[in-house]
């Protein structure tokens, strides 16, 4: 007992704590970088869209399939069995293999010579990326408790804006004579991911899983899904982010096409650089602040995790709609920036709730099911529907106005997002207490 009070042992204990904090910060950083590569490879086709369209002779409908459904086809389905594996086996290995797969398929996309070849390779990218977020969320939830989880997952979510920023800068870097060599960009952003997978495997160890009070207890697939689907707040946050991301995915994959057609007087390299900066600053700031504010405000009321996205979207959505219809390109970009900043705020709170309300031994499954609903609605629907609608309207309105009108209809899913987030805020306090009670009984 006396030895426990020795200064040297206190120092050792402090050093151990500092070492643990430093290591978990490293894990958070490297998983965030992996997530950035996830979004580089996911979004690069939308950024290169005008150049792929010209080279392969594609129409807007085909582009919509490539940007949305082709990627989401197996991405949404494969995530469920991968999450089942992640709740039972080595999550670091799963992430490493997945990163290698999606990076390799992205690099191979640079050799595609027609729509069908590119579509098949996009399906491959989607299969690989399905193994990224569920095990990553599970690892971070073991390293950070519920009072820090929204902030940690907000940092992880910074991989989205930083990844998109890197993709824009890569496209701008390879610009030559007003056109981008899209094939070289695909190869250039794909190959480094394979190297990162090796670094992940060599430097990150599988963490000890959190256990419930009665010891570890694996939860069956059907049981875990049923438990999650009975939580109203889980559904509210899931649908809120899904409807919001329906708009965001459509915008991120069609925005270069929009400015390329509607504001054609702006140099393409300048446009790429501007959007790279906006994503790396305003969008990133929104993602970071969303997690910080939610955790701080959440100490006062758990409703904060749903009210923050509600209020943020109420500010950003009108700005987006106006940005599509103003004549000045810089005013349009400024208003679009406000949307990116505000919509980034829902990521940390939503992902935190998906983990906090889930049974401890079904956290990866919770994220996978969350992403299944999110991506069926948003990733599969947003880019594809905008492309199909734009192609349908092109004959009567022309390419520029058809795309403007198609993007304007995104106001509807954004309104649904605001409504469902607010509804979730009325359920969250009860569900939070119930989740704690159920975890104590498991």
Image (cartoon, helix red, strand yellow):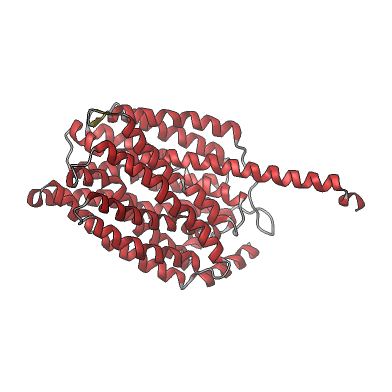
Q: Is residue 80 above or below residue 232?
A: above
Count of marks placed on residues: 0
Can residue 254 be seen at all in this image of the molecule?
A: no
The reply, left or right, for residue 226 in relation to residue 338 is: right
Q: As rendered, which of 141 and 8 lies closer to the eye?
A: 8
In the image, is residue 234 above or below residue 89? below
Position of the C terminus, as image quadrant, is bottom right
Q: Is residue 87 visible?
A: yes
Who's the residue at 23% across and 49% down the image?
329
**Which residue is at the far left?**
396
Closest to the observer, 287 or 203: 287
- In the figure, is residue 121 to the left or right of 63? right
Q: What's the residue at 18%, 47% (across, down)? A: 262
- Which residue occupies 65% across, 64% down? 440
* In-image side of 366 versus 25 (left or right): left
Residue 77 lies left or right of residue 51; in this view the side is right
Percent across and percent down for residue 421 are: 41, 66
Percent position of residue 75, x then y: 38, 44
Q: Nearer the viewer, residue 171 or 132?
A: 171
Measured from the top left, where is residue 72 in percent x and y?
A: 34, 46
**Residue sticking out furthest to the right:** 2
């Amino acid at each position: 007992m006396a030895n426990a009070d020795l200064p040297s042992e206190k120092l050792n204990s402090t050093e151990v704590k500092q070492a643990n904090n430093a290591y978990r910060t490293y894990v958070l950083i490297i998983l965030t970088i992996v997530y950035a590569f996830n979004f580089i490879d996911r979004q690069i086709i939308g950024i290169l869209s005008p150049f792929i369209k010209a080279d392969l002779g594609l129409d807007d409908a085909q582009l919509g399939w490539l940007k949305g459904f082709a990627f989401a086809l197996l991405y949404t389905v494969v995530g469920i069995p991968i999450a089942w594996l992640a709740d039972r086996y080595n999550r670091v290995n799963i992430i490493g293999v997945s990163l290698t797969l999606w990076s390799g398929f992205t690099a191979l996309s640079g050799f595609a010579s027609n729509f069908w070849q590119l579509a098949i390779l996009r399906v491959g990218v989607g299969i690989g990326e399905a193994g990224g977020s569920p095990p990553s969320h599970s690892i971070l939830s073991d390293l950070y408790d519920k009072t820090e989880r929204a902030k940690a997952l907000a940092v992880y979510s910074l991989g989205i804006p930083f990844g998109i920023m890197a993709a824009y800068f890569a496209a701008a870097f390879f610009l030559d004579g007003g056109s981008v060599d899209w094939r070289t960009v695909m190869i250039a952003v794909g190959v480094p991911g394979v190297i990162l997978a090796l670094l992940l495997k060599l430097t990150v160890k599988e963490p000890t899983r959190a256990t419930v009070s009665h010891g570890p207890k694996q939860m069956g697939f059907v049981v875990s899904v049923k438990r999650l689907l009975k939580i109203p707040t889980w559904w509210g946050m899931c649908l809120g982010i899904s409807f919001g991301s329906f708009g965001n995915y459509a915008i991120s994959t069609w925005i270069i096409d929009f400015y390329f057609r509607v504001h054609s007087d702006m140099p393409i390299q300048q446009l790429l650089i501007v959007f790279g900066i906006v994503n790396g600053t305003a969008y990133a700031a929104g993602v970071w602040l969303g997690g910080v504010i939610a955790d701080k405000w959440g100490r006062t009321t758990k409703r904060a995790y749903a009210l923050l996205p509600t209020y943020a979207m109420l500010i950003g959505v009108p700005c987006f709609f106006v940005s599509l219809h103003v004549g000045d390109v810089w005013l349009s970009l400024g208003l679009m920036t406000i949307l990116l900043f505000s919509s980034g705020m829902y990521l940390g709170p939503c992902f935190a709730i998906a983990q906090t309300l889930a049974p401890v031994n079904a956290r990866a499954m919770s994220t996978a099911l969350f992403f299944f609903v999110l991506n069926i609605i948003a990733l599969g629907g947003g880019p594809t529907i905008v492309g199909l609608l734009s192609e349908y309207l092109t004959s009567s309105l022309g390419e520029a106005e058809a795309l403007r009108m198609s993007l304007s209809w995104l106001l509807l899913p954004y309104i649904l997002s605001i409504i469902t987030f607010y509804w979730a805020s009325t359920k969250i306090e009860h569900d939070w207490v119930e989740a704690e009670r159920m975890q104590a009984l498991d």
